[in-house]
Amino acid sequence: MKHNKSNLEAQALAKHIRISSHKARRVINQIRGRSYEQALMILEFMPYRACYPILQLISSAAANASNNLNINKANLIISEAKVDKGAVLKRFQPRAQGRGYPINKPTCHITIIIKSRSQ
């Protein structure tokens, strides 16, 4: 959280989200640079599983901006949104003739930085 007079910004970070970074990035690219309300509308009606954790994260970032910086939620825009790879959970699926087949379950870290719209 940066406290410059010109551009106040709040952030929210979600770690170890059980979805691949590719799939989360597909959703994040749609909302980067949008206003807070517009991003909520877009996420509400997109058919992807990644939308729900990102929706929660944007709501958390907006609450941080509202409570900690006294910024009205109507004036917020998503200035930065990024998805990083997390740890991969490695599992084995039993297969024919006693073999084990490796299954990788990727995780990701999502960061949302939100700031007030400059008038």
Image (cartoon, rainbow, N blue to C red):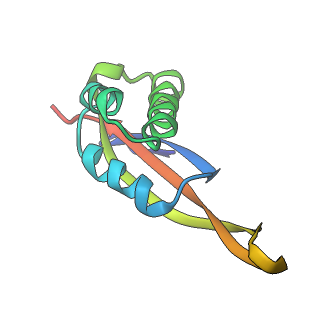
Q: Which image quadrant for residue 35?
A: top left
Is residue 99 something one can see in this rendering?
Answer: no
Residue 117, given in percent of the width and then of the height, sits at 23, 34
Image quadrant occupied by the C terminus: top left
| Nearest to the observer: residue 62 or residue 48 | 48
| Nearest to the observer: residue 10 or residue 100 | 100
Is residue 21 something one can see in this rendering?
Answer: yes
Residue 81, given in percent of the width and then of the height, sits at 38, 52
Total labels drawn? 0
As drawn, the residue found furthest toward the right would be: 98
Q: Is residue 59 left or right of residue 36?
A: right
Residue 113, given in percent of the width and then of the height, sits at 42, 46
Q: Which image quadrant for residue 89?
A: bottom right
- Against 72, is 111 above or below? below
Residue 101, given in percent of the width and then of the height, sits at 71, 76
- Against 50, is 24 above or below? below
* Residue visible at 59% across and 47% down in the picture: 14
As drawn, the residue found furthest toward the front would be: 97
Q: Which image quadrant for residue 22?
A: bottom left
Q: Is residue 7 left or right of residue 18?
A: left
* Residue visible at 35% across and 50% down in the picture: 28
| Nearest to the observer: residue 105 or residue 77 | 105
* Residue visible at 42% across and 56% down in the picture: 23
As drawn, the residue found furthest toward the left would be: 119
